[in-house]
Image (cartoon, rainbow, N blue to C red):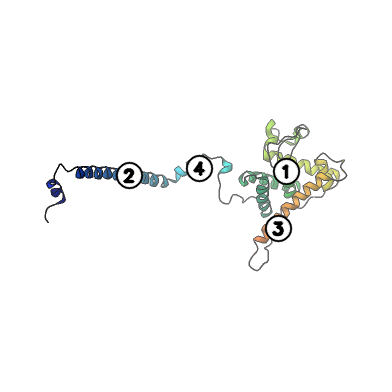
């Protein structure tokens, strides 16, 4: 019983073919096992090394387009009503919320400076361009709010280039100014919308009705989100007042 395994192997007949094959198979299995363990250990070390370097992860994320890089709490600059409208627009028009964020920020800022309802501006954008910042009409109207450059070049900053009307922020600022002036000159919201759409001779006010219907859908989405966020007592917490009132006449 004191004989070791290696000694027993040496005592076995060397001309036994079965034992020879068994010895070869065991050697192959052992070699394969060693290779597998070595590969596993190498991959494990690489993973731990990479996950331990946050700057490496940030570098990979930084290579993606800015509109695709999610960031927590990315909507602190728009009010709750606009945030609810953004979600609705993103779903309806199949546009990335991250791409819509600067458009809604521009609309809110323009509405504040022009005493307009920001949801009215958003509704006009939906009807005019479907939130395509590169839209162009047969008449040469450009951008989100379909502004015709040859008529409104004076509303851009002097240093603005020829492509400024395709810039979302610039286009919304100019479009809001045109809309405000149209409402003031025509004496009312519906008349101003008709003038803005270039269809003042339509007695049915089809264009204006489309814009108002779109605005009402956005307002309904705001109310639904507000109701969903109400407390356990069933009462809805009051939302902060909008920065600009509904516009009827300038």
On the image, the x and y values in percent for residue 37 come to 31, 46
* Disc 1 to disc 4: CB gap under 8 Å: no
Q: Nearer the viewer, residue 213 or 150?
A: 213
Asked if residue 101 can be seen in this view, the reply is yes
* Disc 4 to disc 3: CB gap under 8 Å: no
Comes first in the chain, label 2 or label 4: 2
On the image, the x and y values in percent for residue 78 come to 65, 50
- The dot on residue 36 is 2
The residue that label 1 is drawn on is 125
Q: Is residue 87 left or right of residue 188?
A: left
How far apart are the alpha carbons under marks 3 and 2?
Answer: 60 Å
* Disc 1 to disc 3: CB gap under 8 Å: no
**Viewer-side label of 2, 1:** 2
On the image, the x and y values in percent for residue 185 come to 84, 43
Q: Is residue 134 left or right of residue 10?
A: right
- The dot on residue 223 is 3
- The dot on residue 61 is 4
Give residue 31's quadrant in the image. Answer: top left
């Amino acid at each position: 019983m004191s004989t070791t395994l290696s000694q027993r192997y040496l005592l076995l007949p060397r001309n036994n073919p079965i034992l020879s094959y068994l010895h070869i198979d065991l050697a192959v299995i052992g070699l394969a096992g060693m290779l597998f363990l070595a590969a596993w250990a190498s991959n494990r070390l690489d993973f731990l090394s990479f996950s331990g370097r946050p700057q490496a992860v940030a570098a990979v994320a930084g290579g993606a387009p800015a509109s695709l890089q999610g960031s927590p709490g990315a909507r602190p600059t728009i009010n709750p009503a606009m945030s609810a409208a953004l979600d609705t627009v993103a779903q309806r028009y199949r546009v990335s919320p991250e791409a819509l964020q600067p458009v809604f920020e521009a609309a809110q800022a323009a509405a504040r400076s022009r005493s307009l309802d920001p949801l009215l501006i958003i509704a006009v954008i939906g009807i005019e361009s479907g939130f395509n910042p590169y839209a162009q009409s047969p008449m040469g109207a450009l951008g989100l709010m379909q502004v015709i450059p040859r008529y409104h070049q004076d509303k851009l900053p002097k240093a603005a280039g020829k492509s400024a009307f395709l810039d979302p922020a610039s286009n919304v600022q100019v479009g809001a100014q045109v809309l405000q002036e149209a409402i003031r000159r025509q004496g009312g919201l519906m008349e101003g919308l008709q003038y803005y759409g270039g269809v003042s001779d339509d007695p049915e006010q089809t264009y204006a009705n489309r814009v108002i219907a779109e605005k009402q859908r956005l307002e309904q989405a705001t109310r639904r989100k507000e109701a969903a966020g109400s407390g356990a007592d069933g009462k809805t917490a009051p939302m902060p007042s909008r920065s600009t009132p509904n516009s009827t006449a300038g």
